[in-house]
Structure formats: structure tokens, C-alpha cells
Image: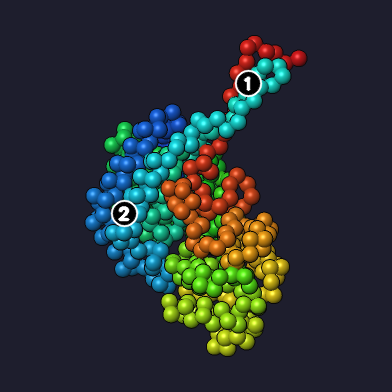
Amino acid sequence: MNHDPAAGLSLAPAPEAERAARWVAEAARAGRAASKILATTPVAARNAALVAAARALRERRGAILAANAADCAEARGSAAFLDRLRLNEARIEAIASGLETVAALPDPLNRVLASWTRPNGLEISRISMPIGVIGMIYESRPNVGADAAALCLKSGNAVILRGGSESLRSALAIHEALLEGVREAGLPEAAIALVPATDRAYVGAMLAASGLIDLLIPRGGKSLVERVLAESRVPVLAHAEGLCHTYVHEAADPDMARRVVANAKMRRPGICGATETLLIDEAIAPRLLPLIIADLAALGCSFRADPRARAICPELPPATEADFHTEWLDAVLSVKVVSGLEEALDHIARHGSSHTEAIITEDRAVAETFLRRIDSAVAMWNASTQFCDGGEFGFGAEIGIATGRIHARGPIGLEQLTTFRYVVRGEGQIRP
């Protein structure tokens, strides 16, 4: 029998699908036992594991960077894709700091969410508790595994991580640091399992693991999320796309609009919170749109523009209808001139993915109307859409962004990784 030291789970010789199913089943069963331990472990121990893991990440940064360099050397894709994959000293420090931030947050477990007393004297309380075993399927960004592991550990959940094939070496190196922290705190290593191979059979095995995995969270491109939603027999918490909009209203401060749009698009164009479509009012577009285009072009952005935008900036390539439905995840921006708030809201309703939308305006009444009527998980006023991030929301990290309507929406942090149960206290009451 083969043994994979990174995962700590046996791998019996078998066809890959059978091998993957066996591995996932073993990982989930071990994770279930680990979650029960975490749920009753004092928060100090869970915090100690995260602090120790942060220290191990810093101590192992040379090995992590070497593993990441090997991944990057073999990767093929756009500049934005490679940016998502690449680690450096600053990004490793950010991962470590994120673990420490999660450790410093309040304990999400055993909170009294609500309590009341019935006329018959029964005292009823709603108490937070872990979900159980979380399956995390993600692509490219190696930090996602560490963020997911930190949030799951703190919230008492076990996690099974399946990272992208292009980042397996990086994921394995980060996983070792996480396990070092768990061991140092005396917690079960099975709380954080990492799929040890790139074969897609492991994704299929996780999707089929009903009764073993309690919740799946996919984080990646459209094709990955669509596959998970279509095939999973396990409940899924997901977002479709990050087709985010920034709307520059006619009452926008021009300098603010230029700064915010540049950041929203070009800070990191490959993340799901990057603005993919700029909407700008026709009243302000003639004097402001050329400046915004020049700012973005200087940063390496290209464009797809509607006829009204091209009438102002004739050099812009024309946009098709499909362009406004496209999550570019790259230095490309769709541009549309609108007649006002109603047209902007209508465009977002028809083309958006319910992720994040922003308005830039000095008109409070218009802003409040926008915030109230936008149906996305996150609505912003005078801020970059790239603030849609668990760390920026004060969650320490995030395991993903949810755009559905069940259980949670927006960045998924500690609170969103808990469910609840009821505790009823009586004095001998019987039901008539």
C-alpha cells in the first residue's frame, strides 16, 4: 500500500476514479472525527494552531517560494492568470498575517444567536455550531488554501482542499506549514486535508461525496463553478461570475472617479472583484471618459466600447453584446455610456452576476437609491469594487464570495461557516 506523506492518507493501487473515491471517503471520515474534536476544543487551542501555522509559513517561505517558482515555470496563461498563481515574500507575509488576524477574531462557536421563553416556561436558545466537513475546490491562487484552512479550523470545521493542478507544488508546501501549526497545538491533522494529485477524478469524487462532505465551496472560473453546480450531490455555496460594474454618475467627483475606476479595474484585474464594465453618464462622459480611458490605457488596459462611448473616444474598439456578458479576468474593460441611473440599473440587472456593483457620485439620494435597488451580494458607494474581500471586510480572510440567496451572500468568513442548533431548557413541562 502506497502512502502519501503530504495527505497522511493511504492510497491503495486502483484505477484513478476508485483511488480518488477511496481517498475522499477516508479524508471525509477522518475530517468528521476531527471536526467533532474542534467543536469542543477551547478557542485558545484553535487560535494557537493558526499562530503556529503563521510562524511556520514565514520559516518555510524559501521552500514555498521555490515550489511556487516551479509551478510558475510550467504555467501557461495570461498575465492576470500568472499573477493569480505567483507568490512572493509580500504575499506569503500577507497569508501569514491573515492567519493571525483570523486567530484574533472572536470565537464563532457556541454563540447565543437568539433566545426566548415560551408561555409554558420553556427557554429556547439558538446556538452557533460548525457545519462539519467542508470541501473546497479552487484554482490558481495558492493563498486560497491557507485562507480556507484558517477559517475552517477557527470555526470548528474540517476541510478537504483540492487546489488547481497548476499550483499543486505551492499548495503542498503551504499545507505542510499548516499541518505544523495544527500539530504544535495538539489538534488532529485530519482537520486540514489536501488532495495529493492533479487528476480531475478527485473533483468528481468530492462532488459525489453525499453524506461524507457537508458543503462544497468552488472558487475559480466559470467552467469549474458550472460543473460543480451541475454535478454535485453535495450542497454548494458558490458564486457564478465576478461580472462587476462601476457606474460613474453625472454628479461624480472627477478626480475620485479616475482614482477609483483605475483601482477597480487594474489593481489586480484577474480577481473576481475587479470591475469588468464601466458605465458612465452621458452628461459627464464627454469631459471625463477620455481621461479615464487615458489613465487605464497607461496601465495597460484595453477596451470594448458601445457606440456612444466610441462617439466620444473613436479609437476604442467596438463592443459586442457578448462583451457585456464577459468576465474578462484580464486587463480588458467593457465601456458603456448611459442616460442616467435607470439605464445603469437596467444594464446591471441584465448583464450582472450578482457579485459587486459600485456607484461613484456626490449625490447622496442617488447613491442611496442605487444601494437599495442593486440586487447583488455587495453594493458600494464611492469605493473600488476590489474591496469585496473577506480581509477588507474584517473577516481576516475569506473562503469565497457567495452570490446565491441561500445561507450566505458576499465574502464568506467565520460566521458564514457556522450553522446553528436549538437548546431547550425546561422544568418538567409536558405537551398537552
Q: Can you give x and y, in whole percent of width and height, for residue 61 in the image?
A: 26, 54
Q: Residues within 10 Å of mark 2 (few under 14, many from 20)?
A: some
Q: Residue at x 26, y 60 (%)?
A: 66
Q: Amino acid at mark 2?
A: Glu
- Quick check: 174 left or right of 298? left
* Cα–Cα gap, marks 2 and 1: 47 Å
- Quick check: 236 left or right of 178? right
Mark 2 / mark 1, whichever is N-terminal? 2
Q: Residues within 10 Å of mark 1 (few under 14, many from 20)?
A: some
Q: Can you give x and y, in whole percent of width and height, for residue 67 in the image?
A: 28, 59
Q: Can you give x and y, in whole percent of width and height, for residue 50 in the image?
A: 35, 41
Q: Amino acid at mark 1?
A: Glu
Q: Secondary structure at mark 1?
A: strand
Q: Is residue 86 above or below residue 174?
A: below
**Label 1: which residue?**
123
Q: Quadrant of the N terminus?
A: top left
**Label 2: which residue?**
93
Q: Can you give x and y, in whole percent of width and height, for residue 55 in the image?
A: 27, 46
Q: Which mark is residue 196?
A: none
User: Mark 2 near mark 1, Cβ–Cβ under 8 Å?
Assistant: no
Q: Residue at x 49, y 46 (%)?
A: 413
Q: Is residue 426 above or below residue 403?
A: above
Q: Residue at x 40, y 29 (%)?
A: 42
